[in-house]
Image (cartoon, coloured by chain):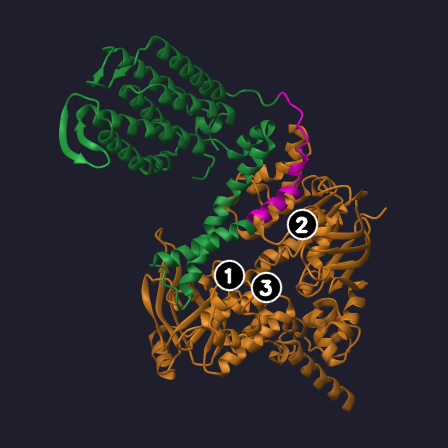
C-alpha cells in the first residue's frame, strides 16, 4: 500500500477564481524521498496541505477526487486523525511551535493521542535524541533561534514516529547552514528509519542529491514526475528556472546529461578533461584580499574615494553587557557600486546595515552619506501598514518597481515577490532619490525567477548612481548582483575584494559554479562557467 | 512575564501544588482587609518570589499595580462621605456635590489599594513559578475550548511582541517614518492587530496538525511520586487555607473603617498575620534537591 496517494484530486480555495490543484494523481511509496519543485504559487503548498488534511478541513473550499494518507481517506479524516500517520512541518518556525518548553512541545502530539505518561516520556526522549535536540529539552521555546525552532517543530511532527513526513519549504526562513542541517536530518530519517519524505523546496541544489524522485508542480498540475536526472533533463527544455546552477552551467555549455550535484558535475568535467587538476597552479584560487587596515590604508581609502555615497568610519556597536557586535568598521561605498555583505549568523551584518541607515546609534564612530539611505529589512510584510498598495507608496515609486497596475490591491493579497517590490517602493519613495539602498536578506523564500528579477532591478538602480549593499547568505544571488564582496566575522570585515575573488576561493562562501570548477577562472555564475567550459571545448576540438 | 524554570522549591513542586499555594494566598488577600494580614501576604509573596529567584519579575508587576492602587485610594477619598475626621473641604463640586475628604475614607481607600496590589502579587508569583504548559494540560481535562484559547493566547503574546518590534523598526526605515506621532504609532498597532489574525490562523493550523482537536483522553497514570517540595508547598497551601477559614470564622482580624478607623482585636491580628507569613515562607527556605 502506498504511504500517500492522490487520485484525480482537484481543489479550489474559497472565493478563488481558479483551482489551486487540478486532477493531481501521485503516489509516494514507503521509504521514498520525494521533492516537490515549482515556482512560487504553483500549488506545492496546497499539495502538502491536502496531504495532511488541512485542505479542505481547515481552509474550506471545493475539493474533488481523493487523497489517502497511511490508509486514511482525507474526505473522512481531518488533520488531527491524519497526524497519527503523517507528520507535517510548514514554513514559519515562529508559528510551528505552540508550547512554552521544548519538552512540552515534543510531548504535546503524543498526549493528544492519549498515550500514557511513560510512553510520552519515551517518545520525547527518542525524538530528541534522533533529531539531536536533547540539549534543548529544558529550554523555553521563546529562547530558540529559527533553526532550533524548526528542528523542535520537526521533532514534534515526528514524535509519534509517523511513516510519512510532509514539509512545506521548511528552510525558507532559515539561514543556509540551518537549512542544510535540516535537509541532512531528513536524509538521515529517511535512510535510517525508512520514513517517507515529501519536501517542497525552492533551492533544489540543496536536496536533489537526496531525492528518489522530483515532482514538478506547474499551475496546479503535475508537470513532471521523474528521478532527479530525468527531471533536470525535462527542466532544461520546459522550465529552465528550475535548473540547479551546475545543471544550468552544463545546459548552457551544451553538455549532457545534466548533473544533479557538484560531485557528479565535477566527475563529468574531469572525465572529459575540462576540469583543471587541483594541483595545477593556474587553477589554484587566488588568496582573498585581506582588508586594508591601519591608519595609512584608511587615509588612502579616503583619498581614493572623495565622493563616497556612504561610508562608515571606526564604527563600534557594543551591547550593555560589553559584547561588541561591530568592532571599528571602516568601509566606503562609491556611487553606483554593487556590494554584497556576507558572513555567518551573528557576524554583525544586520547591525551594520542598521547603522549605515542611521536607524541605530553607534557606540563609537560615525556614518557619512551624501544623501538619503534606504534600508529594506528582511520581512517585507513589516512595511505594510495600509489597506491599499497605492497608499503605501507614491505612483512614481510603484512605477519604478513595476507595481503601478496593482495600486488598488490589498498589500496582503500580493504574492511574496510583489510584496518585496512594494516594500522596496516604500523605502525608495521620497522627494530625493536615495544615495544608497541597503537590503537585508532580500531573497529568503524566493524562487529563482524572482531572485533573478530582483538582481536585475538592483543592477538597474546602480546604473543610475545609487550604491547598492546587500546582506545575504545566498552566494548565487551575491554573484549575480555584486561587483565587490565583504566578508564580515565577529563584527569586523575579514575580506573585502571583487566578487570573483571572494566567491570563487572559499568553501562556504562560494557559488555552486565556483565549486564545480574549483574556482577556475573566477567564474561564479552558470553563464560565466559555461563560457569557460565552451572555450575549453573549442580548444579541445581544435587540438 | 515569561516562565523560566529555576532552582527553587516553588518551581520544583508540581504545578497543581504551586498553583494551590498561590490560590491560598489570593483567597486570604480577598477574605481579609486588616492591614496586618495584607502586609503578611505581601511579605510572604515578595519573600517567596525572592527565594524562588523571581523577585524582580514580581516587583515589576507590583510597580504596574501601584498606580491603580493610588487611583482607588483617591477615588474612595473623594466619593465616600463617611468618616468623622474631615481633613480637606473642597466645597460644592458638580456632579459630586459637597466634597469633604475624611481621614477615614482616605485610610480605607489606601487599604483597598493595598488589597488590589496584594491580590495581584500571588498571581504574578504563580505566573513566574508554575509551568503554563502543565497548567494548560490540567485545564484541558475540564474544558477543551478554554485550554485552546489559552494555548493560542500564550503562544501569540511573544510572537506578536516580536512582530511589533520589527514593524516599528520597518516604520522608522520609511521616508515618512517618524514614530513620534500618535498617528504613526496607531498605524503600527493597527498593522500588528490585523497581522495577529493571520498569525492566529497559522498557530491554529499547527494545533490541528499536532492532533489537538482529536481530544483523546489521556489515561490516568499513578503519576510521579510526591517529592519533599510537593509535600512542603502542599502542606503550606493547606495550612494557609485552614488559617484563612479559621480567621474568617473567628473574626480575628477585622476592622471598622467608619465612622472612625479602628483596628480591633489587640495583638490577635498581628499574631495571625505572623502565622500566615511564617507558614507561607517556611517550606520555601528548603534548598535541598532543587538544583536544575
Q: Residue at x 65, y 23 (%)?
A: B220
Q: Position of residue A514 (x, y in %)?
A: 63, 73
**Camera-nearest label, 2 or 1:** 1
Q: Residue at x 42, y 39 (%)?
A: B1
- Direction from residue A214 to residue A401 in the image, left or right: left
Magenta stretch holds residue B178: no
Count up the numbered dots: 3
To the question of a shared chain for discs 2 and 1, the answer is yes
Q: Nearer the viewer, residue A474 or B214?
A: B214
Whether residue B163 is visible, yes or no, is no
Look at the image and give the residue range highlighted in magenta: B199-222
Q: Nearer the viewer, residue B240 or A104?
A: B240
Q: Residue at x 76, y 86 (%)?
A: A540
Does label 3 or label 1 sit earlier along the sequence? 1
Which chain is tinted orange?
Answer: A
Q: Residues within 10 Å of mark 3 (few under 14, many from 20)?
A: many
Name the quadrant of the C terminus of chain A: bottom right
Amino acid at each position: 500500500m502506498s504511504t500517500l496517494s492522490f487520485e484525480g484530486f482537484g481543489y479550489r480555495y474559497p472565493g478563488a477564481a481558479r483551482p489551486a490543484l487540478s486532477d493531481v494523481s501521485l503516489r509516494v511509496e514507503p521509504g521514498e524521498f520525494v521533492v516537490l519543485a515549482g515556482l512560487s504559487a504553483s500549488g506545492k503548498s496546497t499539495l502538502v496541505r491536502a496531504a495532511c488534511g488541512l485542505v479542505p478541513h481547515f481552509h474550506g473550499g471545493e475539493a474533488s477526487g481523493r487523497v489517502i494518507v497511511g490508509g486514511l481517506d482525507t474526505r473522512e479524516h481531518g488533520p488531527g486523525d491524519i497526524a497519527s500517520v503523517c507528520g507535517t512541518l510548514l514554513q514559519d518556525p515562529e508559528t510551528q511551535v505552540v508550547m512554552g518548553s521544548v519538552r512540552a512541545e515534543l510531548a504535546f502530539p503524543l498526549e493528544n493521542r492519549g498515550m500514557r505518561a511513560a510512553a510520552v516520556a519515551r517518545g520525547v526522549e527518542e525524538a530528541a535524541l534522533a533529531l539531536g535536540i536533547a540539549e534543548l529539552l529544558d529550554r523555553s521555546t521563546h529562547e530558540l533561534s529559527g533553526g532550533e525552532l524548526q528542528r523542535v517543530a520537526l521533532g514534534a511532527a515526528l514524535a509519534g514516529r509517523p511513516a510519512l513526513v510532509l514539509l512545506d519549504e521548511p528552510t525558507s526562513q532559515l539561514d543556509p547552514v540551518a537549512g542544510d542541517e535540516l535537509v541532512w536530518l531528513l536524509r538521515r530519517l529517511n535512510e535510517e528509519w525508512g520514513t517517507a519524505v515529501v519536501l517542497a523546496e525552492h533551492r533544489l541544489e540543496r536536496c536533489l542529491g537526496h531525492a528518489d524522485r522530483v515532482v514538478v508542480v506547474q499551475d496546479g498540475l503535475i508537470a513532471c514526475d521523474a528521478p532527479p536526472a530525468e527531471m533536470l533533463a525535462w527542466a532544461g527544455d520546459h522550465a529552465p528556472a528550475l535548473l540547479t546552477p551546475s545543471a544550468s552551467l552544463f545546459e548552457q555549455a551544451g553538455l549532457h546529461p545534466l548533473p544533479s550535484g557538484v560531485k557528479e558535475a565535477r566527475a563529468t568535467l574531469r572525465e572529459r578533461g575540462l576540469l583543471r587538476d587541483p594541483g595545477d597552479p593556474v587553477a589554484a584560487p587566488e588568496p582573498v584580499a585581506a582588508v586594508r587596515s591601519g591608519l595609512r590604508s584608511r587615509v588612502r581609502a579616503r583619498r581614493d574615494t572623495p565622493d563616497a555615497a556612504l561610508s562608515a568610519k571606526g564604527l563600534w556597536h557594543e551591547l550593555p553587557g560589553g559584547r561588541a557586535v561591530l568592532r571599528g568598521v571602516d568601509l566606503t561605498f562609491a556611487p553606483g557600486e554593487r556590494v554584497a555583505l556576507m558572513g555567518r549568523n551573528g557576524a554583525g551584518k544586520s547591525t551594520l546595515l542598521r547603522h549605515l541607515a542611521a536607524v541605530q546609534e553607534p557606540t563609537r564612530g560615525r556614518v557619512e552619506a551624501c544623501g538619503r539611505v534606504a534600508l529594506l529589512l528582511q520581512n517585507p510584510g513589516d512595511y505594510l501598514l495600509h489597506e491599499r498598495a497605492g497608499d503605501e507608496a507614491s505612483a512614481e515609486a510603484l512605477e519604478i518597481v513595476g507595481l503601478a497596475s496593482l495600486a488598488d490591491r490589498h498589500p496582503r493579497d500580493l504574492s511574496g515577490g510583489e510584496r518585496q517590490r512594494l516594500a522596496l517602493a516604500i523605502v525608495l519613495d521620497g522627494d530625493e532619490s536615495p544615495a544608497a539602498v541597503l537590503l537585508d536578506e532580500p531573497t529568503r523564500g524566493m524562487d529563482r525567477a524572482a531572485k533573478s528579477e530582483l538582481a536585475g532591478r538592483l543592477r538597474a538602480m546602480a546604473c543610475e548612481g545609487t550604491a547598492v549593499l546587500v546582506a545575504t547568505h545566498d552566494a548565487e544571488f551575491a554573484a549575480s548582483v555584486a561587483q565587490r564582496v565583504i566578508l564580515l566575522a565577529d563584527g569586523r570585515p575579514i575580506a573585502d575584494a571583487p566578487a570573483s575573488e571572494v566567491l570563487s576561493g572559499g568553501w562556504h562562501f562560494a557559488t555552486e559554479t565556483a565549486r564545480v570548477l574549483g574556482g577556475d577562472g573566477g567564474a561564479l555564475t552558470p553563464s560565466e562557467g559555461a563560457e569557460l567550459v565552451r572555450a575549453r571545448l573549442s580548444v579541445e576540438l581544435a587540438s | 512575564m515569561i516562565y523560566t524554570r529555576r532552582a527553587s522549591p516553588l518551581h520544583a513542586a508540581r504545578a497543581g501544588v504551586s498553583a494551590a499555594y498561590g490560590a491560598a494566598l489570593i483567597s486570604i488577600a480577598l477574605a481579609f482587609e486588616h492591614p496586618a494580614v495584607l502586609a503578611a501576604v505581601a511579605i510572604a509573596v515578595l519573600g517567596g518570589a525572592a527565594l524562588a529567584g523571581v523577585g524582580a519579575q514580581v516587583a515589576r508587576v507590583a510597580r504596574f499595580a501601584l498606580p491603580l492602587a493610588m487611583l482607588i485610594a483617591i477615588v474612595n477619598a473623594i466619593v465616600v462621605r463617611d468618616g468623622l475626621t474631615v481633613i480637606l473641604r473642597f466645597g460644592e463640586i458638580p456632579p459630586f456635590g459637597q466634597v469633604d475628604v475624611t481621614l477615614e475614607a482616605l485610610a480605607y481607600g489606601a487599604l483597598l489599594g493595598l488589597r488590589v496590589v496584594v491580590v495581584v502579587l500571588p498571581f504574578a508569583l504563580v505566573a513566574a513559578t508554575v509551568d503554563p504548559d502543565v497548567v494548560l494540560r490540567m485545564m484541558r481535562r475540564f474544558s477543551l475550548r478554554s485550554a485552546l484559547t489559552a494555548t493560542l493566547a500564550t503562544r501569540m503574546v511573544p510572537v506578536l511582541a516580536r512582530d511589533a518590534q520589527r514593524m516599528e523598526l520597518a516604520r522608522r526605515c520609511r521616508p515618512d517614518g517618524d514614530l513620534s506621532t500618535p498617528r504613526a504609532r496607531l498605524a503600527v498597532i493597527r498593522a500588528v492587530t490585523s497581522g495577529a489574525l493571520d498569525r492566529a490562523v497559522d498557530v491554529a493550523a499547527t494545533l490541528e496538525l499536532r492532533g489537538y482537536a482529536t481530544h483523546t483522553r489521556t489515561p490516568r497514570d499513578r503519576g510521579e511520586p510526591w517529592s519533599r517540595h510537593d509535600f512542603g508547598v502542599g502542606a503550606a497551601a493547606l495550612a494557609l487555607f485552614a488559617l484563612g477559614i479559621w480567621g474568617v470564622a473567628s473574626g480575628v482580624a477585622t476592622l471598622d473603617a467608619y465612622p472612625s478607623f479602628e483596628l480591633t482585636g489587640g495583638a490577635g491580628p498581628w499574631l495571625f498575620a505572623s502565622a500566615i507569613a511564617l507558614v507561607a515562607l517556611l517550606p520555601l527556605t528548603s534548598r535541598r534537591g532543587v538544583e536544575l
